[in-house]
Image (spheres, grey):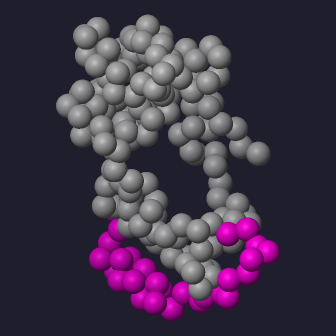
Amino acid sequence: MNGTRGDREEVERNRASTPRRSSSPRRRCLDVQAQDFGLLIHPYRNHPLMEHVRSQLKSRGPVGFSELQRALKDFDAQGKLALTREAFGEALDVNDITISTIEADTLCSLFLIEGRGLMDYEDFLQALRGPLDNDRRFWVHAVYDSFEKYDDDSVDVEEVIRRFDPSGDPEVVSGIKKTK
């Protein structure tokens, strides 16, 4: 998956020559810049407890994150993308995440939904993902640059759908989402 220097130079040359289309208000477009792909910084991403959980998941390989994601969904009995502190702790236990009860409570409190006493586990997962490494960021930019863009740098949603195979997406693999 490593981008070689030659790959990177070719992508840069192609970026400059990528055709542009005039914007059309009747077409559904993705109004996303390449730098927006997965680069948003969550305020708790670098919290020491997040780093601790992330390192345990990484030690399990590519399935670690997907298994935790599935367990959180399974413990969400009401399907509201929210968990009690107890359910969150159980989901961590099922995945052999070794943190104390106090640490689990602390993590849970970082992602509480105001006024509900429940944690937003989707927000937790978003923060847990961590930033894209340079190689992945390179390939995300390369794929984005391969699309024909409108004058405003948006791309046609139908073109993305035609070219995207979601079967390897972690949320599809974990059973949270289904391919359509």
Using the rendered image of the protein, determine whether residue 64 is visible from the camera's viewpoint.
no
Q: Quadrant of the C terminus?
A: top right
The number of numbered discs placed on residues in the rendered structure image is 0
Q: Quadrant of residue 50?
A: top left
Q: What residue occupies the far bottom of the structure in this picture? A: 17
Q: Is residue 151 above or below residue 100?
A: below
Q: Quadrant of residue 42?
A: top left
Q: Is residue 62 magenta?
A: no
Residue shown at the point (43%, 40%) measured from the top left: 126
Residue 13 coordinates in the image, percent (x, y) = 42, 88
Is residue 83 or residue 52 the one in the foreground?
Answer: 83
Q: Is residue 14 magenta?
A: yes
Q: Quadrant of residue 91?
A: top left
Residue 165 coordinates in the image, percent (x, y) = 65, 54
Residue shown at the point (35%, 83%) measured from the top left: 9
Q: Quadrant of the N terminus?
A: bottom left
Q: Is residue 149 above or below residue 114?
A: below
Residue 145 coordinates in the image, percent (x, y) = 51, 76
Residue shown at the point (61%, 24%) measured from the top left: 80
Q: What residue occupies the far front of the structure in this picture? A: 115
Using the rendered image of the protein, determine whether residue 162 is visible from the camera's viewpoint.
yes
Residue 158 coordinates in the image, percent (x, y) = 74, 66
Q: What residue occupies the far left of the structure in this picture? A: 48
Residue shown at the point (31%, 42%) measured from the top left: 43
Instruction: Judge from the rendering whether residue 127 lies leftward or rightward of residue 26; answer left or right.
Output: left
Q: Is residue 139 above or below residue 18?
A: above
Instruction: Judge from the rendering whether residue 116 lies leftward or rightward of residue 10; answer left or right.
Output: right
**Residue segment shown in magenta:** 1-29
Instruction: Judge from the rendering whether residue 96 lies leftward or rightward of residue 170; answer left or right.
Output: left
Q: What residue occupies the far right of the structure in this picture? A: 26
Is residue 49 or residue 168 the one in the foreground?
Answer: 49
